[in-house]
Amino acid sequence: MDHFPYLSVLTFTPLIGAILILFFDRESKTAMRWVALSFMLLDFIISMVMYFHFDPTYDGMQFSENVVWVKDWGISYKLGIDGISLFLVMLTTLLGPIVILASWSDIQRRVKEFLVALLILQVGMLGVFASLDLFLFYVFWEVMLIPMYLLIGVWGNPARRLYAAIKFVLYTIVGSLLMLVAILALYLMAGRETGVYTFDLLALYNYAAPVNAQFWMFLAFFLAFAIKVPMFPFHTWLPDAHTEAPTVGSVVLAAVLLKMGTYGFIRFAIPLFPLASQQLTWVVLTLSVIGIVYGAWVAMVQLDVKRLVAYSSVSHLGFVMLGMFAMNMQGVQGSILQMINHGLSTGALFLIVGMIYERRHTRLIAEFGGISKVMPVFAVLFMIFTLSSIGLPGLNGFVGEFLILVGTFKVYPWYAVVAASGVIFAAVYMLWMFQRVMFGEITNSKNLGLKDLNSREVLVLFPLLIFVVWIGVYPNTFLKPMEPSVAKFIKQVNERREAAIHAGKPTFPVTAQVLAPSSAPAVSQKSPNQE
Amino acid sequence: MTPIQLPDINIWGILPALIPGLAGMVIMCVGLFMKKRVLGASMIIAIAAVFLSVIANGGMPTEPKTYFSGLFVLDSFTWFFNLLILLATGLTIPVAGRYLHEEGLEQFEFFVLLLFSACGMMFMIAGGHLLMIFLGLETLSIAIYVLTGYLPRSAVSKEAALKYVILGGFSSAVFMYGVALIYGTVGSASLPAILQAFQAGKPGITGMAGMLLMLVGFGFKTAIVPFHMWTPDVYEGAPTPLTGYMSVAVKAAAFGAFIRVFLGALPSMYPAWSQVLWVISVATMILGNFAALRQTNIKRMLAYSSIAHAGYILIGMIAGNKMGTAGMLYYLLAYTFTNLGAFAVVALVGSKGEANTYLDDYRGLGRNHPIIAMTLSLFLFSLAGIPPTAGFVGKFMVFRAALEAGYVWLVVIAALTSAASVFYYFRVIMKMYMEEPVQMPQRLQFGPGALIVLLITACTVLYIGILPTTYINMSLQSVQLFH
Amino acid sequence: MEAVIFYALAVFTLVSATLVVTLHRPIHNVLFMVLTMIGLAGLFVLLRAEFIAMVQLVVYAGAIMVLFLFVIMLLNLDEPIVEREDAQSRRSWFGVAIAVYLFFLLAAVMLYVYPAPYENVSYPGLTNTQIIAKELFTTYLLPFEVASILLLAAIVGAVVLAKKVTRRVGPGADGPAL
Amino acid sequence: MSELVWLIPVFPFLGFLINGLLGKSFSEKLIGVIAAGAVGASFVVAVLIFLELLGMPPEARSIQVEVFRWISSGTLQVPIAFLVDPLSAIMLLVVSGVGCVIHIYSIGYMHGEYGFRRFFCYLNLFVFAMLILVTANNFLLMFVGWEGVGLCSYLLIGYYYEKQSAADAGKKAFVVNRIGDFGFLLGMFLIYVNFGTLNFTEVFAAAPETLAFGGTLVTGITLLLFVGATGKSAQIPLFTWLPDAMEGPTPVSALIHAATMVTAGVYMVSRCSILYALAPTSMTVVAVIGGLTAFFAATIGITQFDIKRVLAYSTISQLGFMFLACGVGAFASGIFHLMTHAFFKALLFLSAGSVMHAMSGELDMRKMGALKPHLPYTHATYLIGTLAIAGIPPLSGFFSKDEILFNAFTVNPGFWAIGAIAAIMTSFYMFRSVFMTFYGKSRVDPETAHHVHESPKLMTVPLMILAFLAAVGGFVGIPFAHLNKFDEWLAPVFAPAREIITHGAHGGHHSVTLEVTLMFVSVAIAVTGLLLAWWMYIKDTEVPERFIAENPTLHSVVYNKYWVDELYDILFVNSIVDFSRFLWKSFDEKIIDGAVNGTGSLARGLGGILSRLQTGMVKDYAMSILAGIVVLIGYLVFSLR
Amino acid sequence: MITLQHYLVLSTALFCLGVIGVMFRRNLIIILISLELMLNSVNLAFVAFSRFIGNIEGQIFVLFIMVVAAAEVSVGLAIAVAVFKRQGTINVNDVNIMKW
């Protein structure tokens, strides 16, 4: 490591902020907010600097850092990003200051803890995107869980926050613990076969596990990530978590946390288990397509704006999964781009819902109507993000969805056809919601006195707006740096799939025994790497 | 008549174990003559004894040595457990001192018995002969029985002691019956002899029955299903610092002896006992975790959690490889700090007369005592096995070992039950942070000692969770002789 | 002749032991326990363990059992506990059944015992008591010493448990009893 | 000049940005000038480009200008690039020209409305999108315009968002359009997958080799694209949104729902003429749908009383004519009719708007009558429009419609027949509207009657411009010999398609006699309709009521638009909503969440059972240990025995 | 000829009688006596083994078991006294505040 450790600094800057805030008096709320904001901004600036140092033509990991952590086990503190993770990192850092700003007046209770939780959450998310060691990844993955739990549980909606919080945690932890087992299994099998015990992701990419084992391990990873994505039918935690979480929680959850699942697939599940992921592609595609249509339909009949947006996430992320498993340039690029897009537009939508919730303390669609009249600026922004969410050309959502659908259509036309119908339903539920909230006459007298957005709120949405338009108009800024990494990803996975097929590895006789037969090993058996 | 040839007496070797016993006697003498501040004095002596003992324990011995005609084995394994027991004792003493003071029990006997039990544990761990192990076990048991019933005005404390003594006696008898059978079929009760005889396959079915009966004895002390039934009641009824002590030190010592006997002397029977332990481990994890879901008393909840953890630790034993055994040691180390910390908080929050031991008493603790709540959360995360805490590394090690040995389903079950465990651990956090306090609980009485204990345990839980290498290597070296 | 003595003692012991667990007045239980121990002492003699037999009579039957009697008298516990029919007592019968079953299992195991080979005459010219003494103070010196700590713990423990609540000082003195 | 084609869409977009971002404090006049000026600038550029094209040899009249690479992903390369050729030049002129006129009209019409600025922003945005649509050089960019105009249509229909019906109509338009877009999108995917590009020129050049004549693939592509066209151009079965779209301000109806946007489908089909030529089945489908729509919408038009709705159904019907033209291979005729239709239908709508303006927003023709003296200019322009649409020579509609009918006859007299019937009805209902509005007895509310006044100059001048165009617009396409400059102009674009059609089907050269004969029939048709209307609404006004009384069922079916909306509601809207509700309440909450919560309860239940084992009785605990021992020893005994 | 098996079966019988006592009786004193009975049966087994394998270790064990028994009895009885003082009964079935 002969360069400035960008990624470590990037990842742990918020932690410093968190520690600093711990020393503040709990009553000096504004000061703490400023500290948090400045650390988040600093983080964003660092990421911008990093972006300008990023070599968009190189297909490997950049800004790599590698420090041995637990030597005997092959665990290292290894960070690095490529075109795939670059923009997810940027998205995370972009949202950092935004969420702090967005919570400025929203959160008045236990501000100190709130800011600390947000900052630690930021550390976890950045760590997940940057880590290239399975162990490290798992650590960050779990670290993320706790602040999110607190965000939902402490600052959530009084009614059902506890239920939603614990549901979120349990759902996630079931998946991630099974993933831990699979990580260990992979580590051991690779170590046993190659003689090198390591959690290094890039090294494990080169190990081809037996098909049976791949199947089970992929399934474990699949479960963990599918829950996080969330894919149908593992999605039911999401509406609850979104609805009960405070605005900022929903924003982070939607914009970044859900991407952990999809990112997990692209970074871990597919390249580590190329054959299993190929064999199970149809399962993933089917669930994605069901998710797209199902999410849209259920979103259509929601009574609560946040729930509606939550279900729309299920639908949108179905697209992401679909494109990824198409395994061609358009599909995968579209999928990554759509991750960003979803982060921007759904994040913005949650912010918008939060702004109106702050004014009216309800999110029921029926309570609103005719808001356009009293809040014209709000109406315009709301409209733009709604359109972005339904994939209007010229805004970001379209580019992603189009690439995904093209990519999918090339290889799985029927899936693409069904998925494309989701585009129709997206228009239905979003516009219907928009109409019921914003149009019509003001029937509820409480809505008459609503104030339009203040400058802080506009400032919160403005960066998102810029990117929404930018990606829509000139997506190449984002597609170009991705391209080499995506090409490499596709090439590697396909090569390994072909290699496995040429090697005559059988297709699935599915049995439970993955590792060595459990005929009891002699007690004195030495583990290979502990001499 | 031939003159008696004394055996190879080596006081230095047994010094770490001897010091607590001697210190106990010193406290008795001092206590008899002091009228005031007897509690503080005995506390200081006890802590000094622990420090002395740690010094006497020294660095990790490279070669195993035996003293007293093979009855006392001083090796890295002994060393590790000595350290563990001393740590547990040392960390319990300040908490107990604060607790006893609050309860108005200004007496020295608590520390005497505590030190005697530590002494018994260390002799048990070092035992190279079943007789030593039995005597050590009984010494610690007798002391712990008494300590359980130590609270003079508490009915539950007496009840716990009663249950413990009956069941403990019962299991001791069973254990001794097993020892008798082993002795009879091997011709000796020394561990090397047992190792040889079993490798030669001589003891036959009777010897194996002896082995299983011993397993019952160890199973009782380590609180594994179905020998766990005493645990919730005794943990609930015992004075809180003692509960913490029991859950780590006694469990650790029992596991140590368990490992020494089963891996040190009976490895040839691994196929038989590992199958038995597989079933037991699964049952233990399931029962411990699921029963804990319904608890309203935090001590009882932690008791069930401690049962569950015994199940996880057993996984390392079932794996039967070096990583597994080392994993057990590491797990015990992590668990020692974690659980002692947790019980220290429980003792603090419990206040006088253990008035606040229900989960509902923790409502709003995050608001009223943020530091305490934060440390308790940390311990709970560690118990739940969430990185980057020590508990995670422990689980990671035993899981890894079991997978290495091919026990996939065992690990999957362990993972799923541990997911269930998250529910009840997080429920405490929920109570602390997410529920409004019904009434402000009375100011908690902190003592500097208890705070230092919290600080040490919390920092260590994080430290060995983030930088575990040294401790992993330490535990790996400690189990060198079994593999 | 040996057989006759064995069977006589065995029957005597078993009957006494059965009475120990069945009789209802604690005094009777203790007395029959003493008888059981006497039977066992006889068996020990039969097994050439004269010293153990002696200790059995003197310490066990003589001292420990007297402790029981002492407590019974002290607390005036001789009244039998009224037996109630409840769920627990029904479950007790189940426990008895399991215990009986355990007997058969263990007996089966015992019948297949392969004892360790006989070590002939390791201590020429010493009596049983001498051998024990020699062993106890050489090979088993450490357990002998540890046993002292054990007994000390028991003594301290008995004192702690049985003594009245004494010094009521400190902050908890006026708190309510649990 | 043509390399500056990107200026054409940019001007309106600038207008949109200036008004949208900075226009908060602008006066109405300034806003109007900026907006209309922007479109006018586009028009000027379009004219310049048109002139430049005119100066080129016909083969060279196809210029592509790439601005920048938009999406670049592997083999998918989509630029923002424009195609200037005769077809797009015509469309540019029509869109920017008519657009400009309507902008000017709107300044007067919208005077004093709440959201004046918003209106012009949307309108400029619309023109921008529409210009993108017609100048795009690839399918994806066209799709951008396609969706963009849909969006603006949504926004403008819902302009009076406080009105529930307006908001509903906007949403309906967007969603129905999206259904069409779904087809467009799929067609586009098929094209990309098979051609590897989305560029028009490349696709069309490669089409004859790549696609088998009449093959499934090309049929699939064209039909899917046509689904898109039916959505945008309000053809059966996706026409229901257009009548509702009349909720928008009248200039919107004129610009979007008559002159430009709704013709996008026709433009797209014509643009893809070569693909359609390769797929005879699709051609037939297009023709049949076009003919049916023309007929069907006309029948509804007869019964309506709302003047704008009459015009709306007439639009649908005329669009049907255009598709009929495309379907029979007469793409140039389709575009010709598109152009003339843009003139006279915009004129009609704007005139209707003028009427409405005068009548304080009244739209019901039953409450009009005898307005001619009050609204002389409006009456004149409306009448010209009606004459044009009815096909009275020598107004523009006559030439274009006649050409379509003639071409239809050459392919299949059945198509001609249906077209002819639709034409009679067109003539009838249009004159019906004229008579009901401007002639006969006045049925105006006394109160409104006071305020009836002619519109300001700002509105009447645009009317006159359009009237002029509607009157003379047809002369560019006089269907004789070499007078048909229009066909000639478009020939380079449609030549490959024509070649395939004439080559593949009957390559008969049409006779002039037949053409002349049919022309007279057309005139007769138009006049018949006129007379019928005169008889029923001027001479004997009792006839309609008698007719209704005699055929109540028929009337009610037609009057209620065949209950198509209601049918769709039942079939699609309600069933999907109900099903979704079922999915949410029953599947999501009961089954999935039920399973999740059930697992939780199960765990709790198990926990309850397990902790109840802890009875508190020490002897039960001992029994547990004992049981453990027995199991262990039993296992030993029985496993070894 | 009396073999080792005889003694062992007798010892087993005594052991199980002790177990029955623990299972069946509810008087704490009698339960403690039953535990003594179990330990005595262990002693018998040790002595028998000691005799039949000619090894003195078993008898040493017996001595220590007696020590332990004494200790356990003293503590057990002390607890019995304490419980009786507090609750007025030594019926173990009545001592069940803590459960579940």
Image (spheres, rainbow, N blue to C red):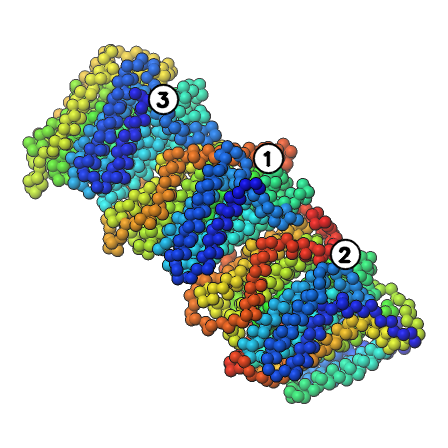
Which residue does the numbered mark 1 point to in the structure image?
A: A496
* Identity of the residue drawn at 69% across and 72% down: B20
Q: Is residue E32 left or right of residue D310?
A: right
Q: Amino acid at mark 1?
A: Arg
Disc 3 chain ID: D
The residue depicted at 20 percent of the width and 39 percent of the height is D26
Say few, some or many: other residues with alpha carbon within 10 Å of mark 2 (under 14 / 14 to 19 / 20 or more): many
Q: Nearer the viewer, residue A502 or D92?
A: D92
Q: Secondary structure at mark 3?
A: strand
Q: Quadrant of residue B269?
A: bottom right
**Looking at numbered disc 3 in the image, what kind of residue is underneath it?**
Gln
Q: Looking at the image, is D153 positioned above or below residue B336?
A: above
Q: Position of residue B231 (x, y in %)?
A: 61, 69
Distance CA(mark 1)–CA(mark 2)? 43 Å
Depicted D319 relative to depicted A358: above or below: above
State left or right for residue D262 relative to residue A239: left
The local crowd at label 1, few if under 14, some if 14 to 19, many if 20 or more residues have their Cα within 10 Å, is: many
Q: Position of residue A278 (x, y in %)?
A: 55, 37
Q: Quadrant of the N terminus of chain B?
A: bottom right
Query: Dot 1 lies on which element?
Result: helix
Could you say where residue B418 lies in the image, as x and y percent from the top left?
A: 57, 57
Residue under pointer 3: D64
Residue located at (17% from left, 32% from top): D105
Q: Is residue B61 visible?
A: yes
Image mark for residue B268: 2
